[in-house]
């Protein structure tokens, strides 16, 4: 060793290097753990999602029409394509209403003016269930509740449908 | 309704509303060329998908039984007995319309000996059942089949 003044002593140098390398190693171990712990917070919310239907709002009339749409749904690691259908119309005040076509009796698919002589009603081919245009179940037919509806969102003139909620029109 | 826990419990509660049983007839074999086997497996996949779609449309009145699977090599006469037994059991439970679906033309020839109604369909010529074009073809066939089922109901 020379007698010159050392700016950094051997001991200091070793201390710095060890702390540095040790710090990197600790970070390498901890960061995946932290990422995993906060992961649920970073996931996008599932519930409030809206799906594009490809239908322009200006083309929706007062007559319910069938709108088919599909989107990808993720169950854990498995991604599957889900197809959904809605009966969509505009009410007197111009609001867009979208009904789920699933019969409240046993879950068949209802059709607007299906069957014979069911004008201005939804008809379920399975057991003859009937619903009015606003989704209200016709008394005396098997269904005991009105048709469910989709949450509706309009963006750039296009129709987006969200989760299914109980009927609020009736 | 299908053969799973949730649906069957619904079935047990609302038996009086379910009067139509549908059963896919699915041949199975492992001997044959690659082409034959692929065709056979594709048919099975297609029919299963088909039945699932039909069930979804009319799930409140239709019960989709598990697939009736048989070895392609087995003589068809043996299977006829087994099919009739399936049908008998379903009739005993109050099913009025029984429809057995198949792509296998062997059944068409043996139709007279079958008690339930047999619906033989030509195989839709689609290469890959997952692409958009194939879905359209299937969709239109499914619609025709569901219309046929409503025709049975109107008898």
Image: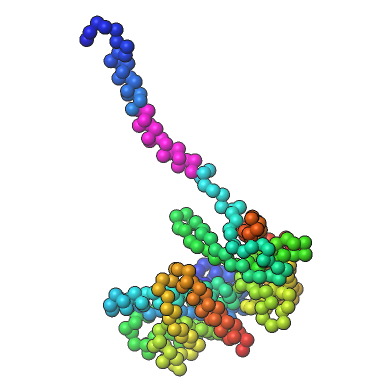
Q: Residue furthest bottom?
A: B112
A40 is higher (above) or lower (below) than B29: above
Nearest to the observer: residue A68 or residue B56: A68
Kindly tell me whether residue B85 is visible in this rendering: no
What residue do we see at 46% from left, 84% from top? B121
**Quadrant where the image shows the N terminus of chain A:** top left
Q: Position of residue B92 (x, y in %)?
A: 54, 84
What residue do we see at 37% from left, 28% from top? A23
Q: Residue furthest right?
A: A92
Q: Is residue A45 magenta?
A: no
Kindly tell me whether residue A38 is visible in this rendering: yes
Question: What is the magenta segment's predominant secondary structure?
Answer: helix
Report the span colored magenta: A22-39
Q: Is residue A25 magenta?
A: yes
Where on the picture, by quarter, is residue B155? bottom right
Where on the picture, by quarter, is residue B27? bottom left
What residue do we see at 61% from left, 52% from top? A48
User: Does residue A153 appear to the left or right of B29 in the view shown?
Assistant: right
Nearest to the observer: residue A71 or residue B41: A71
Nearest to the observer: residue B92 or residue B81: B81
Q: Position of residue A40 (x, y in %)?
A: 51, 45
């Amino acid at each position: 060793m020379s007698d010159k003044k050392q700016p950094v002593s051997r001991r200091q140098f070793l201390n710095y290097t060890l702390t540095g390398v040790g710090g990197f190693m600790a970070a390498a171990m901890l960061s995946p753990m932290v990422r995993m712990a906060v992961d649920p917070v970073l996931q996008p919310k599932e519930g409030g999602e809206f799906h594009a239907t490809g239908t322009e709002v200006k083309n929706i009339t007062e007559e319910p029409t069938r709108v088919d749409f599909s989107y990808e749904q993720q169950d854990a690691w498995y991604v599957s394509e889900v197809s959904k259908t809605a009966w969509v119309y505009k009410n007197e005040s111009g609001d867009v209403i979208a009904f789920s076509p699933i019969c409240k009796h046993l879950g068949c698919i209802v059709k607007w003016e299906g069957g014979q002589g069911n004008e201005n009603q939804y008809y379920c081919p399975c057991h003859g269930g009937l619903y009015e245009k606003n989704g209200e179940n016709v008394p005396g037919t098997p269904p005991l509740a009105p048709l469910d509806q989709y949450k509706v969102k309009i963006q750039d003139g296009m129709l987006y449908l969200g989760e299914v909620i109980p009927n609020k029109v009736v | 309704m299908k053969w799973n826990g949730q649906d069957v419990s619904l079935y047990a509660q609302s038996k009086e509303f379910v009067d139509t049983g549908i059963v896919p007839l699915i041949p199975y074999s492992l001997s044959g060329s690659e082409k034959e086997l692929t065709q056979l497996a594709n048919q099975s996949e297609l029919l299963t998908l088909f039945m699932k779609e039909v069930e979804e449309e009319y799930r409140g009145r239709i019960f989709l039984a598990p697939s009736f699977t048989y070895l392609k090599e087995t003589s068809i006469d043996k299977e006829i007995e087994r099919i009739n037994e399936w049908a008998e059991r379903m009739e005993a439970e109050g099913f009025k319309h029984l429809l057995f679906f198949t792509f296998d033309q062997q059944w068409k020839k043996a139709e007279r000996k079958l008690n339930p109604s047999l619906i033989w369909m030509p195989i839709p010529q689609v290469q890959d059942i997952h692409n958009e074009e194939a879905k359209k073809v299937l969709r239109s066939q499914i619609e025709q089949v569901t219309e046929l089922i409503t025709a049975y109901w109107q008898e």
